[in-house]
Image (cartoon, helix red, strand yellow):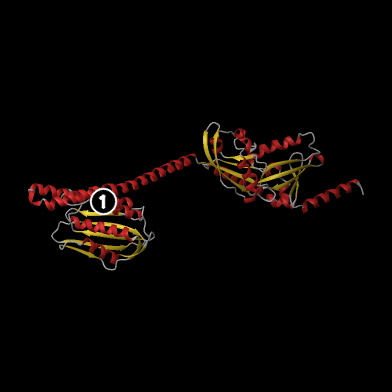
Amino acid sequence: MTIGTQDILIKHNARWLMDIAADAMLIADADGRILLANPAAERLFGYTRDEFTGLTVEDLIPRSLRASHGDKRAAYATQPNSRTMGAELEIVGLRRDGGEFAADVSLSPLEKGQVLATVYDITRRKQAEQALAAAQEFAESIVDTMQEPLVVLDADERVVSANQVFYQVFQLTEEETLGQVFFELHQRQWDIPALRQMLDEVLPQERRGKAFELQHEFPGIGSRTVLIDARVIEGKSDQPNLTLLTFLNITERKRLEAEQARMIHELESANEELKNFAYVVSHDLKAPLRAIGSLADWIAADQQDRLDEEGQEHLRLLIQRVRRMDGLIDGVLRYSRIGRIHEVAVAVDLNELLHEVIDSLAPPAHITVMVASGLPAIRAEKTAIQQVLQNLIANAIRYLDKPQGRIEIDCIDQGQSWRFSVADNGPGIEARHFERIFQLFQTLNPRDRVESTGVGLAIVKKIVEQCGGQVWVESTPGQGSTFFFTLSKNSQ
């Protein structure tokens, strides 16, 4: 075989290898003119084999990038080993239809300055890289917007990531933090046996450690109470797991908890004092009060003939005020017991209970009390509900000023609760007094004209609110008043 025949055979074999290659291949001369292109290159760039032979390499590059590509090709051509060594370039390719794509080009030198260029379309790879970069940027932005400091540790407990809040709160820089062993940060202030045990022993087993509360004097920021939460971030099978630590500053919460505990203690002490006070009132005040009342009754009965009209009036006022004082003490005692003494909740038939209450109050003949039919049976503390109804009805009876008084009692089902009402045609109440009348010891009329302790409505309000309900009044002066209260069905 002659040398010429051998060259022809080599070229034929090279042409055949290019034709069957899956990757796009081009052969260009030293001036960049394309001499040969394989079918894969035709499919990639959109030119026929004949059309390729009239093109240069620059024709396959976007016009705006040809200068930079020319610089790369010139730099490769001037390299001392460019005739024996290949090169790798990343370019932007231009298809015949004007479409652009990212490509890796592998250059292999041939004889007479010719170059074999193998072109790989890396569009999908570039898209994946961009998507990954965008996802990473998005994840980092989420981390940086978190209000709690956090760090990520590798298997050697070195810090691989931290958010900006961590640096700001603990007054550290990235240089002082990244790559450092977590337990050596902040003058080894995290080197705590219990925290080490959680990370080294508990976390590998449970994948999430129990929250660790740390009270510490941090350099530069003072004493802080921090709640540390640890969990494992599981990677792919070929990647090691990471540990995420988050830090929640609970200093203010702990202060508020301590303040709350102090206030609860003070409240308990005040309640205890109230119970003692109620005991003193019950035993030490009522006894001499009863003695005064008994003495006044004796004087009124035994000395009636010796007292003139003025003396008898003074004695009547004395007896009246002694009895008022006795009623006031009873009211205070009842008010103080609300919420401290509980009965067992039972089924209460309001039809029967109201009948008992009205009978016990014995309304005067000129007052008619009307009760709606079919009132519900509720589950509640019977005595408490009895006190509410008794005080509201007694209040209406006490203040009725019409020749024919009327009191109407009704109930409406509101779905989740019952709404009760006690309406009268009495003198009514001005709107400016709506809140005042539910306060302890508040009355709207002089006590010598209308006997009242000012405790009844305060008892109603306290009982209803402790049952989870509300109480209010609607009234028009001269036309009467309606007192409403609600009881939740869920609390029964």
Q: In this rendered view, identify the residue nearer to me: 139 or 210.
A: 210
* Quarter of the figure with the C terminus: bottom left
CA neighbours of label 1 inside 10 A, class few (<14), some (14 to 19), many (20+): many
| Element type at mark 1 | loop
Judged left or right of residue 18, residue 307 is left
Identify which amino acid the numbered label 1 is placed on. Answer: Val
Q: Is residue 206 visible?
A: yes
Q: Which residue is mark 1?
A: 455
Q: In this rendered view, identify the residue nearer to me: 117 or 166.
A: 166
- Judge whether 422 appears above or below 97 on screen: below
Query: Which residue sits furthest top?
Result: 220
Query: Which residue sits furthest bottom?
Result: 374
Judged left or right of residue 390, residue 267 is right
Judged left or right of residue 244, residue 443 is left
Judged left or right of residue 258, residue 79 is right
Residue at 88% x, 46% y is: 4
Q: Is residue 431 visible?
A: no
Quadrant of res 183: top right
Query: Which residue sits furthest right?
Result: 1
Expressed as whole percent of the image width and height from the top left, the position of residue 477 reads: 18, 53
- Judge whether 134 appears above or below 468 on screen: above
Expressed as whole percent of the image width and height from the top left, the position of residue 334 reads: 30, 53
Residue at 10% x, 51% y is: 304
Q: In this rendered view, identify the residue nearer to me: 94 or 344.
A: 344
Q: In this rendered view, identify the residue nearer to me: 264 or 325.
A: 325
All told, the count of numbered labels is 1
Expressed as whole percent of the image width and height from the top left, the position of residue 54 reads: 72, 45
